[in-house]
């Protein structure tokens, strides 16, 4: 029993970084495009990180990534995520939980989203932003920077098999990062896709390998080593529109839920919000054609089934897609 309680306590402490997005309610809202200003600030932070890394006097990759992490990470470590969530540097759209698709959520569906204090927290239901043509939760930036770096480090720097790296991300999404009743109760394929695109983002920093989506998707390197010093590449700028697509949209790439009760409540909200099929039943994806675009786009990766949900809303299985030890 003590072991179980300890595991739950650890899960809850790690889940402090779990946040969810509402891509359904936000579809009817006029959300401001922040692509240009957030890209500008990101490139300024890149310059700052490069300058700090050069204090060592050599092109040390470990030092560079350490400095970049200070700018690009989750809300407790990364400056850009703090700017998006707390500093009010960009216009964001906040959806009150009781007006959201998670209106009926209780602690029995997902503690972190169902508790009373969740209504006061920007870390429970994520603010929404538009990046070019795509509306996403601010949490997707955090996933890109944080878990994206984990994926990048394991696969590109440590040489681990990509499928095993992605499976580990699936396991974490089912536990500490959302998909159980002790966290938010939502297993998000949008989060998994954000993790994956974050891996691409970090690979583009030095662009030592072709993009996993193909050479045509190479947009780096953002940083180069010249004469023993790091320098930002003036011809290659960070543009988050390269990483934000419908795979990160949970009304297209549908989520799964920790229990049947949560699934039923979520589907009732879809009906309430008018997302129904020809039979009047809850509908997800709301744009099947966009989902098929994502299926085709990510097929080349070899791990598409871990990123794109073709089955729609349902209860998550905790005993499939779990990585072997």
Image (spheres, rainbow, N blue to C red):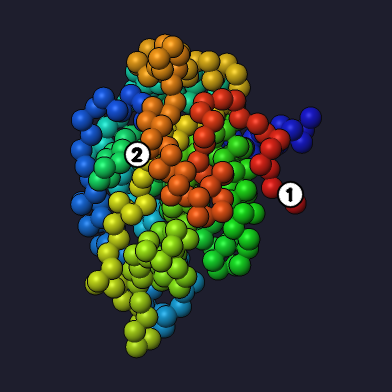
Task: Give neighbour class at mark 2: few <14, some 14-19, many 20+ (Cα, 10 Å).
Answer: many
User: In the image, is 239 to the left or to the right of 126?
Assistant: left
Relative image position of residue 268 (x, y in whole percent): 45, 13
- How far apart marks 1 and 2 lie (CA) works out to 32 Å
**Label 2's element?**
strand
Taking the spot 34% from the left edge, 65% from the top edge, the residue there is: 219
Q: Residues within 10 Å of mark 1 (few under 14, many from 20)?
A: few
Q: Classify 93 as above or below 85.
A: above
Asked whether, in this view, residue 101 is left or right of residue 84, the answer is right
Mark number for residue 190?
Answer: none
Q: Position of residue 163 (x, y in %)?
A: 62, 54
**Residue 184: % across, % down:** 52, 29
What residue is rendered at 48% in x and 26% in y?
A: 113
The residue beneath circle 2 is 136
Which one is nearer the viewer's eye here, 71 or 2?
Answer: 71
Label 1, secondary structure: give it: loop
Give the residue displayed 53% in from the left and 47% down from the top: 304
Determine which residue is flagged by label 1.
324
């Amino acid at each position: 029993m003590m072991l179980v309680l300890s595991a739950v306590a650890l899960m809850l402490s790690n889940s402090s970084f779990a946040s969810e997005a509402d891509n359904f309610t936000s579809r009817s809202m006029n959300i401001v495009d922040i692509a240009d200003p957030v890209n500008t600030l990101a490139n300024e932070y890149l310059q700052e990180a490069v300058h700090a890394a050069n204090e060592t006097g050599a092109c040390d990759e470990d030092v560079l990534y350490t400095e970049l992490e200070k700018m690009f990470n989750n809300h407790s470590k990364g400056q850009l995520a703090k700017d998006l969530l707390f500093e009010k540097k960009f216009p964001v759209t906040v959806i009150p939980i009781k007006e959201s698709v998670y209106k009926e959520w209780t602690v029995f569906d997902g503690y972190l989203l169902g508790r009373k204090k969740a209504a006061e927290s920007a870390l429970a239901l994520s603010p929404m932003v538009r990046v070019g043509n795509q509306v996403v939760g601010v949490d997707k930036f955090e996933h890109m920077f944080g878990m994206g770096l984990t994926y990048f480090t394991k696969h590109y720097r440590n040489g681990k098999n990509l499928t095993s790296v992605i499976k580990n991300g699936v396991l974490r999404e089912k536990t500490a990062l959302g998909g159980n009743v002790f966290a938010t109760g939502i297993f998000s394929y949008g989060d998994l896709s954000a993790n994956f695109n974050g891996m691409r983002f970090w690979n583009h920093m030095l662009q030592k390998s072709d993009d996993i989506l193909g050479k045509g998707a190479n947009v780096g390197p953002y940083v180069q080593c010249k004469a023993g010093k790091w320098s930002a590449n003036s011809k290659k700028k960070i543009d988050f529109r390269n990483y934000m697509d419908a795979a990160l949209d949970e009304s297209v790439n549908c989520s799964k839920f920790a229990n049947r009760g949560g699934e039923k409540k979520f589907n009732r909200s879809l009906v309430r919000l008018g997302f129904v099929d020809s039979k009047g039943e809850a509908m997800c994806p709301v744009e099947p054609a966009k989902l098929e675009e994502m299926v085709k786009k990510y097929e080349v990766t070899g791990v598409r089934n871990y990123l794109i949900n073709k089955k729609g809303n349902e209860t998550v299985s905790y005993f499939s897609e779990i990585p072997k030890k």
